[in-house]
Amino acid sequence: MEEANRQGAPTAGGAGAQAGGHRRGRSQRRGSHRQRKPERIPCELARPVFFVGFMGAGKTSVSRRLARLCGIASVDMDSYIERREGKRIRDIFAEEGEGRFRDLETQVLREMTQGDPALISCGGGVVLRPENRAILREGGFVVFLKVDSDEAKSRISDPSTRPLLGDAEAARKTNAERLPLYEEVADITVDTSGKGVTALAYKVKSILEKEGILWPRK
Ligand code: S3P
């Protein structure tokens, strides 16, 4: 799975979707293995859908891919905070501390429950505050993308963008500590191990349709 662009630019449906994030050359795209374009059917959402899970779980990539498939808006909370504050997340942590970042996160999370429902990818630590867990449970439908911390680390191309990731041991410990919190808020859990962004987006789509959260626009 490729790591999502952190600046809020939508990831293209096909570009970077192959393992390792390599784009295919023109000649390869024209070859016999050319991928079928995903079918795009405009849909509506009943409620906001929040993607939660550890760093590197694929929350941003999967929610953006699903948004493109369904013609629905997606918001990445970290990118939103970065644009609003005019600062990178790592600089907010370094200059103002984790507490300030968590306050911004709670403010933005509340905003996300208002207005037109969208697909929202949350930062991995959003579940730490009991207040946020209540907002998630009451304000929308929560998709927990589950990932093993070693796989998560391998998906993150620039660990300096994640001040709380740490080394392999620290990541394993943090992921294990947070697991019960992700489970507490989750309406559904999707295991992401070994799966690509598009397959996961289709899987979440079919679950949301079955749950009556997502349907084709009339
Ligand atoms: C964090 C995860 C990051 C970002 C911040 C803190 C965490 O988001 O919000 O660095 O505490 O797990 P991603 O989960 O999108 O990497």
Image (cartoon, helix red, strand yellow):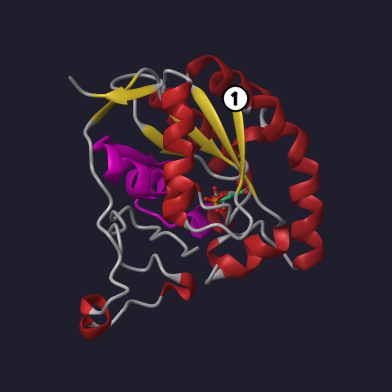
Mark 1 beta carbon near ligand 1 (under 8 Å): no
Comparing 104 with 191, the one in front is: 191
Q: Which secondary structure type mostly characterizes the magenta part of the structure?
A: helix
The residue under the point 53% across, 71% down is 158
The answer to whether residue 86 is left or right of residue 54 is: left
Q: What percent of the width, then of the height, locates residue 35?
A: 30, 65
Give the amino acid at mark 1: Asp
Residue annotated with mark 1: 187
* Location of residue 208 by image quarter: top left
The answer to whether residue 149 is left or right of residue 42 is: right
Q: What percent of the width, then of the height, locates residue 97?
A: 60, 49
* Location of residue 71 by image quarter: top left
Does residue 212 sit above or below 90 in this rendering?
above
**Residue extending furthest top?**
138
* Location of residue 102 by image quarter: top right
**Residue extending furthest left?**
218
Comparing 10 with 43, the one in front is: 43
Q: What percent of the width, then of the height, locates residue 118?
A: 34, 30
The residue under the point 40% across, 19% down is 47
Does residue 65 sit above or below 119 in this rendering?
below
Q: Is residue 128 magenta?
A: no
Does residue 20 sit above or below 108 in this rendering?
below
Q: Is residue 91 magenta?
A: yes
Bounds of the magenta segment: 63-92
CA neighbours of label 1 inside 10 A, class few (<14), some (14 to 19), many (20+): some
The residue under the point 29% across, 57% down is 13
Q: What percent of the width, then of the height, locates residue 96?
A: 55, 49
The residue under the point 76% across, 67% down is 168
Determine whether the residue tagged by mark 1 lies in a helix, strand or loop: loop
Image quarter hosting the C terminus: top left
